[in-house]
Image: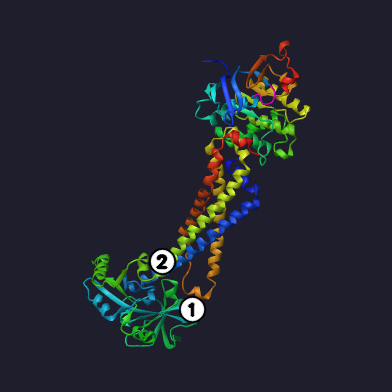
């Protein structure tokens, strides 16, 4: 008999109580994993936006609630483009529209000559030619969804476009969208003389970070976004998701800890006499404490395993919703699972600490007298 | 340095803010290899004495030295309990979820004995208490006498110098009680283990080398059970 088999048996004494506690914690872990993978997918989408047009950073309007609401005037765009150290400043108007089953179809309006300077990875066909108005390139997912290829015609936001190429987007959102000439998208969006943001590539040898701060200094109402963590300056979505993630994690830990504490307090109370016996035969208080804590942590790790499996299944379930498919692709990263396991272990430790201390603080005689 | 295994001097212990005075100046000495029975009326402090020597509790005053350990000032009583004493309770106090073999192994964890050695030693001890073939039985599947024999095997798990037995036959029928006593005698004869036993039972006390009679929390008389003046009056052991 090993120490761990002793732990295992103790947990199996009250099977129903143990099972209910595991399920309670697993529900919390399920939500943590599902939200973690979904948030990770959103971050990847944002990362994809940042990488568009071969840019070092994006310039957008400070305080926008959503990135698509950001507006940079043509005057500001030109002024940014004229700054020292700027190799390329690509203005793009982003139009979010429903297309087919995708409610978040991204139509990116870019001047064809700018697109040619930093094109997306073409899978087939060519880029829209300068001077054309209704040529479009589709992301591979959008093309597959529309069953379109170069030479086909598609209708986006009421306008008919000729598909001239298909590209592979860096994230699910851009891969499910399209590029069209800027002027055409401006007409569709009824947004003349503005772009959503400007993608800036610094000249070789120029410090992009310093250039970004120079731009912010010169244009106080504009912000620069160099990484996913900056995205909150122009879009509250990620910040809201992060806050939600944190809140759910805190709730999962709190409720899980209460469940574990309840279970372990009951177990310790029921087994007080046994702890007295263990102390009477020479077990140190620390060993008794380790027994209680290990039981709780083992219980929580089983819950973590169950929660991770359910979290992945829940995410897959969410991804069956058509509207979500074009928005993000869940990211099953190691850190999400590590976080789930650490949260579970933390829940076990926090929840079992008081019961374990209670078990240890009793004198052997007191414990032996317990009925 | 005293050669006594157990030396108690002026031990005082009370409960409930001194309303219950269990020991009022107890003196006791036990030599290595002795089998000593402590008798006395209910509430005279017999079990309290045993619990103090087992380091399950600390005295209010006086000194208790066992195997060179000063139990009043000893900082690590867990190690003392694990290494130097084995305790047999009136009720077996076995862990209900563990079988006989596992119950016997429990004290060995504290001495860091490896799993295979634990199992082998537990098997030998169960063989000693004549429970071979019952290793896989859990306490509810054993008779009262068998449980108590498992408890004796557990008490011997770490080869203690001193075996303490608190009414070990108190919950057994006479035949099962006789088997347990035979076993204790055998253990003492075979391994030289010192035994300090508390009992109400005259027949049990008669098996000891020496009988200590307690009254009102202290020793009243000490004598050999076979010597004429030491024959216990029935009222004293009830």
| Image: magenta residue range | B40-44
Would you say residue B41 sits in the magenta stretch? Answer: yes
Does residue A140 lie above or below A133 as drawn?
above
Q: Is residue B235 above or below residue A362?
A: above
Principal SS element in the magenta part?
A: loop
**Which residue is farthest top?**
B228
Label of residue A102 in the image: 1
In which chain is the residue bearing label 2? A
Q: Is residue A9 left or right of residue B134?
A: left
Q: How many marks?
A: 2
Q: Nearer the viewer, residue B179 or B4?
A: B4
In the image, A142 versus A371, the foreground residue is A371
Seen at 74% across and 17% down, the residue is: B233
Q: CA distance from mark 2 to mark 1?
A: 24 Å
Asked if residue A153 lies in the magenta stretch, the reply is no
Quadrant location of the C terminus of chain A in the rendered image: top right
Where residue A364 sits in the image (x, y, percent)? 58, 34
Q: How is the image coloured?
A: rainbow
Question: Image point 45% across, 67% down: which residue?
Answer: A41
What percent of the width, then of the height, locates residue A67?
A: 38, 74
Residue plotted at (52% across, 46% down): A353
Q: Quadrant of the N terminus of chain A?
A: top right
Labels 2 & 1 near each other (Cβ < 8 A): no
Q: Where residue A239 is drawn, which disc sits there?
A: 2
């Amino acid at each position: 008999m090993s120490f761990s088999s002793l732990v295992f048996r103790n947990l199996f004494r009250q099977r129903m109580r143990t099972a209910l506690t595991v399920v309670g914690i697993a529900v919390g872990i399920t939500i943590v994993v599902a939200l973690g993978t979904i948030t990770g997918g959103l971050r990847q989408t944002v990362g994809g936006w940042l990488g568009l047009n071969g840019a070092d950073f994006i310039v957008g309007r400070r305080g926008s609630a959503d990135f698509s609401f950001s507006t940079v005037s043509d005057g500001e765009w030109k002024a940014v483009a004229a700054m020292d150290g700027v190799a390329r400043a690509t203005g793009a108007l982003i139009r979010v529209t429903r297309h087919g089953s995708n409610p978040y179809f991204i139509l990116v309006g870019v001047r064809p000559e700018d697109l040619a300077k930093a094109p997306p990875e073409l899978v087939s066909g060519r880029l829209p030619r300068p001077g054309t108005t209704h040529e479009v390139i589709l992301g591979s997912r959008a093309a597959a969804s529309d069953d379109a290829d170069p030479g086909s015609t598609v209708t986006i936001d009421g306008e008919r476009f000729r598909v001239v190429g298909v590209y592979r987007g860096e994230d699910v959102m851009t891969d499910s969208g399209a590029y069209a000439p800027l002027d055409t998208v401006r007409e569709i969006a009824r947004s003349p003389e503005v772009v959503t943001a400007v993608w800036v590539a610094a000249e070789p040898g120029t410090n992009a970070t310093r250039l970004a701060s120079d731009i912010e200094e010169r244009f106080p109402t504009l912000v620069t976004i160099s990484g996913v963590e900056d995205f909150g300056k122009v879009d509250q979505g990620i910040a809201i998701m992060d806050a939600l993630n944190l809140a759910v994690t805190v709730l999962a830990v709190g409720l899980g800890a209460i469940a574990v504490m309840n279970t372990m307090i009951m177990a310790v109370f029921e087994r007080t006499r046994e702890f007295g016996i263990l102390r009477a035969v020479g077990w140190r208080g620390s060993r008794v404490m380790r027994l209680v804590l290990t039981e709780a942590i083992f219980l929580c790790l089983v819950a973590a395993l169950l929660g991770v499996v359910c979290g992945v299944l829940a995410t897959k379930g969410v991804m069956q919703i058509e509207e979500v498919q074009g928005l993000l692709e869940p990211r099953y990263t190691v850190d999400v699972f590590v976080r789930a396991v650490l949260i579970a272990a933390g829940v076990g430790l926090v929840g079992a600490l008081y019961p374990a201390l209670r078990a240890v603080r009793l004198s052997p005689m007191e414990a032996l007298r317990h009925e | 340095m005293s050669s006594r295994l157990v030396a108690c001097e002026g031990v005082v212990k009370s409960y409930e803010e001194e309303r219950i005075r269990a020991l009022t100046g107890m003196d006791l000495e036990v030599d290595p290899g002795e089998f000593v029975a402590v008798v006395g009326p209910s509430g005279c402090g017999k079990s309290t004495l045993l619990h103090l020597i087992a380091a399950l509790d600390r005295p209010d005053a006086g000194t208790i030295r066992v195997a060179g350990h000063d139990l009043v000032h000893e900082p690590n009583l867990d190690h003392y309990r694990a290494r130097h004493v084995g305790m047999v309770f009136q009720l077996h106090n076995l862990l209900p979820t563990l079988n006989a073999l596992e119950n016997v192994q429990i004290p060995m964890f504290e001495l860091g004995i490896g799993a295979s050695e634990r199992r082998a030693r537990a098997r030998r001890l169960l063989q000693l208490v004549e429970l071979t073939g019952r290793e896989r039985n859990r306490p509810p599947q054993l008779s009262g006498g068998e449980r108590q024999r498992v408890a004796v095997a557990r008490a011997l798990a770490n080869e203690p110098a001193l075996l303490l037995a608190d009414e070990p036959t108190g919950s057994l029928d006479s035949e099962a009680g006789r088997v347990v006593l035979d076993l204790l005698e055998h253990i003492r004869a075979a391994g030289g283990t010192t035994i300090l036993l508390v009992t109400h039972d005259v027949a049990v006390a008669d098996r000891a080398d020496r009988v200590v009679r307690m009254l009102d929390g202290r020793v009243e008389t000490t004598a050999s059970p076979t010597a004429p003046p030491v024959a216990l009056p029935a009222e004293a052991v009830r």
